[in-house]
Amino acid sequence: MFTSLRSRLWLSYAIVITIALGVVVIVLFIFLLRNPVLYRETTQRLRTVQSQISENPRGVLDNLESVQRIAQANDARVLIFDSTRTLIFDTNPEQPELPFPRRNVLGRTSQFTTDSDGGLWLHATSRLPTGNVMLVAAPRPTVRLLNVFADELLIPILQGGVIALLISLIFAFAISRWVADPLQKVVTAARTYPADAKPVIPRGPREVQDLTVAFNSMVSRVLSAQKSQRDFVANVSHELKTPLTSIQGFALSLLDGTSESPEARRQAAQVIYDEAGRMHRMVLDLLDLARLEGGTADLNMSTVDVGVLLRNVAERISLQAQKAHVNLQVEVPDNLSTLVGDADRLSQVFTNLLDNALKFTPANGRVVVSAKNAGGWIEVEVADSGEGVVSEAMPRLFDRFYQADPSRSRGESYAAGLGLAIAREIVQAHGGKIGVRSSVGHGTTFTIHLPHAQT
């Protein structure tokens, strides 16, 4: 019992409401105990005496007989003090002396006073037009404890308290449902996932809505990851299917004797070797990408001169540029900052970007690799004058196995579309970021930001 969040919320609200109403009842009981109905009736009688005396058109001191008569008729005692707090009149001088009324710490006159013999009196005071103070008093009635329960105010107040308690419990139940029901829907959605992967509508308090939004975001990411895994398996299967088919076909030709001549056997063996090498490179790239994404790749960190590294990469790829009749330019300042990183991995990134730029740049085109200091970063750009990338392909350019133009690079090292994905992971492993901007007919520019050694 009371194991669910809804029941516990309702129980906590019920306890708080009960305590609050209990405090109200205790305060009410204390008030009635200190000011029972007999006290209130006596106080009202004293105030009636005050009003009757004050309504006398003649001065009070000029008509003391009337004051005496009014006091006796109402079983009250009237005392008059002058401005110096000296008693000048008492309707019952034979009774114990009553002091001048004093104020408490709150500046209010207490309704009780004590005579010279220790007796308690109820009194009411008022200031006369002459500046004198009139005190109307009566002995405090004796009240039994049981009389408090007979007070006419107790029953309606208790009835109102019970009604308030019931209404409060109903509201507490509604509030507990308002908080718990959205959470229950999140729990239900989590239990039915992935059979029912619909997003949960955010409802309830702000914190519960934030939880629901986070849950929907998590489900979306999980679905996206599952889709990526399915696409990954499909792409790997597709990429491996072609070389495996070639290997199987040419191996069969060797087995059944279809390739009879030495030239045909040599050609079949060459195809098998090339396709096996292609599969081997793909597997190595997949393992490399998995290590980079998982953060388990070994990076040999050291101080790297980016300018020297870019010139070396450009020199290695210059022969490929000459064959493609592409003008390769390197624009690196002498004061370029150094960085701490893995030189081989960074060389892999720049080689991949330059290799792609050369593939997609027509003859007599230009590829420019440049670098500069940009605040706490080293900014490297690889720009080509090729045909550019369509806008639809830009968001997926760094995805695994994605090729903006798959017909352009069959047979190459990065034909499977892993080069840019690996490059992004390497740059991010160095604390940097990589971006691309392109437009059809105006070429493509890859921009890499790497933190320099001081950062």
Image (cartoon, helix red, strand yellow):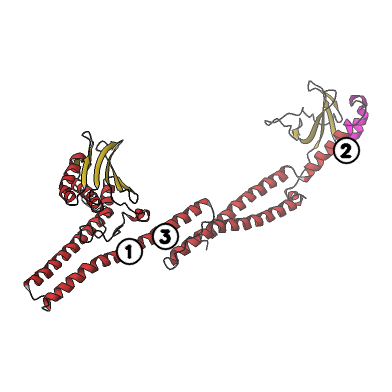
Residue indicated by mark 3:
219
Residue beneath the point at 24% across and 38% down = 453
Residue indicated by mark 1:
231
Residue closest to the far left: 262
Apparent side of residue 375 relative to residue 205 in the rendered image (left or right): left
Q: Quadrant of residue 291?
A: bottom left
Tag 2 or tag 3, which sits nearer the N-term? 2
Q: In the image, residue 93 lies at what x, y percent?
A: 85, 28
Q: For the residue labelled by badge 1, is the local secondary structure a helix, a strand or a loop?
A: helix
Q: Is residue 455 visible?
A: no
Which is more foreground, mark 3 or mark 1? 1
Q: In the image, residue 116 lies at what x, y percent?
A: 76, 30
Residue beneath the point at 72% across and 32% down = 108
Magenta range is 52-72
Q: Residues within 10 Å of mark 3 (few under 14, many from 20)?
A: some
> 99 or 221: nearer the eye?
221
> 246 or 219: nearer the eye?
246
**Residues marked 3 and 2 touching at CB (< 8 Å):** no
Apparent side of residue 10 relative to residue 398 in the rendered image (left or right): right
Q: For the residue labelled by badge 2, is the local secondary structure a helix, a strand or a loop?
A: loop
**Label 3 is placed on what type of residue?**
Val
Q: Magenta region, mostly helix, strand or loop?
A: helix
